[in-house]
Amino acid sequence: MQSIDLRGRTLDTLALRQLIPRPVVDVAVASSSARTLIDDVAERGEDALVEQSERFDGVRPLALRVPQSHIDDAVRSMDPAVRAALEEAIRRVTAASSAQVPAASRTMLGDGAVVEQRWHPVDRVGLYVPGGKAVYPSSVVMNAVPAIVAGVRSIALASPAQKEHGGGVHPTILAAAGLLGITEIYAMGGAGAIGAFAHGVPSIGLSPVDVVTGPGNVFVAAAKRLVKGLVGIDSEAGTTEILVIADESADPRLVAFDLVSQAEHDEAAASLLVTDSETLARAVTEVLPSVAAGTAHSERVRTALAGPQSAVVLVDDLSAAAAFSNVYGPEHLELQVADNDALLSDIHSAGAVFVGPHSPVSLGDYLAGSNHVLPTGGGARFASGLGAFTFLRPQQIVRYSGPALSEVADHIVALSLAEALPAHGEAVTARFTPPHAD
């Protein structure tokens, strides 16, 4: 891994942003490609989806709309250990998501002056579960459970067709969806799938959705950005990131395992260690090769760790580490220092924070109860991870009596005249003025 030494330097936000290691991704190319694929699906529908699957997944989909019998078969043949793990994940994510549902509120602003707020779920959502280098039944849980908890009426799910499964969606994905009662599943992936959710594909029974959620590669993230406005999105959850803030009290071996655990996702995955301890930095760097060599995807891990997006960052102190992290805005942030709670109070930009040596990111990926669909690429500076609130809309309800309106009428008239919108004020005063006789 490359080393970045920031010790002895006082850096503002702009300077830090320029020094932050990021993957070398041509966003313009990704956006242009995604736009072409989305437009093709909007224009040609089913034919475009089939061609895109053949081109990118190397297989013709067995059926774009997955038959219910395939879902049922997948549930029946599911590995018992995997089923038990998914059922426990569903239980935990359901509990955590339920706590996110806001209560309705009622504010009294005076006699007869009431503003209420209630929350409504969106009607229909499209959940994207990536394929590619791994299979992600956990992403089915993370996408679907918050939507179910929020009360979404209609849920559709998309995942790429798999060559190893004859053009069908991976059976474990189907089984996870089946456990959650999802029956509308499509064998489609990438930017085209996002476009299909946004525009609909009538020939396969796919109606447009209101919100699209789920992680994916840079093209999926670009596609979500492009359809935002036509539909809602959760965040641009692209290639994974982990940033570990650790001091000399941390176990270098555990830090190395955590960096490797995220690097195995993708060659462009970002793994960063930020530390005020040169001793720890050296120890982690020394143990990383053996940890990487022992994993099933060692070449992928080595590529990710050697990439421009990964680094060991040396800072003067933990305050500087927190400042670096807040500007970076990591998807996953681990704190492994002597006083984690003190450091946590300085953290304000992270998709999810994992506190202490027994809270690794892997826990959050599967069974913590938190959600693993999180913003990447610095998105945690202004966005949040997926939750029940993603699928809920606040609606304000205004109830004023005549006397309550009269009390603020003069203020309304004054503001309407200041904005050169006199009809606004007239609409209020008309309620207290008798109509003119003809």
Image (cartoon, helix red, strand yellow):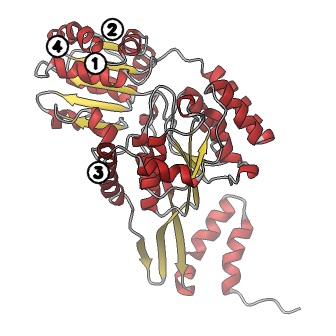
Q: Are marks 1 and 3 in contact (CB under 8 Å)?
A: no
Q: Residues within 10 Å of mark 4 (few under 14, many from 20)?
A: many
Q: Earlier in the sequence, mark 4 or mark 2?
A: 2
Give the CA distance from mark 4 to mark 3. 36 Å
Q: Nearer the viewer, residue 256 or 103?
A: 256
The N terminus sits in image quarter: top left
Q: Are marks 1 and 2 in contact (CB under 8 Å)?
A: yes
Which residue appears at 23% of the width and 10% of the height?
290
On the picture, is 149 further left or further right than 29?
A: left
Q: Nearer the viewer, residue 327 or 185?
A: 185
Q: Could you say whether the residue bearing mark 2 is in a helix, strand or loop?
A: loop
Q: Earlier in the sequence, mark 3 or mark 2?
A: 2
Give the CA distance from mark 3 to mark 2. 36 Å
Say which amino acid is labelled 4. Answer: Leu
Residue with the mark numbered 3: 88
Q: Nearer the viewer, mark 3 or mark 2?
A: 3
Q: Could you say whether the residue bearing mark 1 is in a helix, strand or loop?
A: strand
Residue with the mark numbered 4: 280
Q: Position of residue 204 (x, y in %)?
A: 71, 50
The C terminus sits in image quarter: bottom right
Residue 1 numbered tag = 2
Q: Are marks 1 and 4 in contact (CB under 8 Å)?
A: no
Q: Earlier in the sequence, mark 1 or mark 2?
A: 2
